[in-house]
């Protein structure tokens, strides 16, 4: 059992990570790149996770509802500026939010 700042209390990481797969997409807009993270379980506070990621990766971003035709899933997602695919994957594994086999990193 553990307690963290992401909205989960007294739930083991294995229980939280079994329901969904997380998809990390990068999309190019002009010269800029945007990274979308979808599929994080709703039991987590996405605003807190996005805030922590922005601090760690030194980038801008937000947690909001997206409906993009190029992104597989729609719904509440984390959006970060720049190509943050590997940083996000490492962050989710290190903080026991998702297991490595449940994280799918997609290219452009």
Image (cartoon, grey):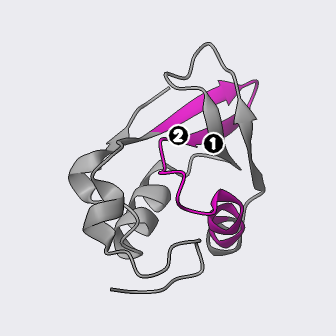
Tell me the SS state at disc 1. strand
Query: Dot 1: within a 10 Å radius of its alpha carbon, few (fewer than 14), some, or many (20 or more) residues?
Result: many
**Percent x, y of residue 91:** 45, 67
7 is higher (above) or lower (below) than 89: below
Residue at the (21%, 50%) spot, across then down = 101
Residue that badge 2 annotates: 38
Residue that badge 1 annotates: 77
Residue at the (27%, 52%) spot, across then down = 18
Residue 94 magenta? no
Residue at the (74%, 30%) spot, across then down = 31
The single residue placed furthest to the bottom in the displayed view is 2
The quadrant holding residue 49 is bottom right
Image quarter where the N terminus lies is: bottom left
The single residue placed furthest to the front in the displayed view is 10
**Label 1, label 2: how far apart the Cα atoms are:** 5 Å
- Residue closer to the observer: 82 or 106: 106
**107 sits left or right of 100 in the view:** right
Q: Where does the magenta region start and end?
A: 24-53
Residue at the (49%, 21%) spot, across then down = 72
**Percent x, y of residue 46:** 64, 58
- Residue closer to the observer: 8 or 27: 8
Residue 26 magenta? yes
User: Which numbered tag is attached to residue 45?
Assistant: none
Tell me the SS state at disc 2. strand
| Number of marks present in the image shown | 2
106 is higher (above) or lower (below) than 78: above
Query: Dot 2: within a 10 Å radius of its alpha carbon, few (fewer than 14), some, or many (20 or more) residues?
Result: many
**Percent x, y of residue 50:** 67, 61
76 is higher (above) or lower (below) than 29: below
Labels 1 & 2 near each other (Cβ < 8 A): yes
Comes first in the chain, label 1 or label 2: 2
**Percent x, y of residue 96:** 36, 72
């Amino acid at each position: 059992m553990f307690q963290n700042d992401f909205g989960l209390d007294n739930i083991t990481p294995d229980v939280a990570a079994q329901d969904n797969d997380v998809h990390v997409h990068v999309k190019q807009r002009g010269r800029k790149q945007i990274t979308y993270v979808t599929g994080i379980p709703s039991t987590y506070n996405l605003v807190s996770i996005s805030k922590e990621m922005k601090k760690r990766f030194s980038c801008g971003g937000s947690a909001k509802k997206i409906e993009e035709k190029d992104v597989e899933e729609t719904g509440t997602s984390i959006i970060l500026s720049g190509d943050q695919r590997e940083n996000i994957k490492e962050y989710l594994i290190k903080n026991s939010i998702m297991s490595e086999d449940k994280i799918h990193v997609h290219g452009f």
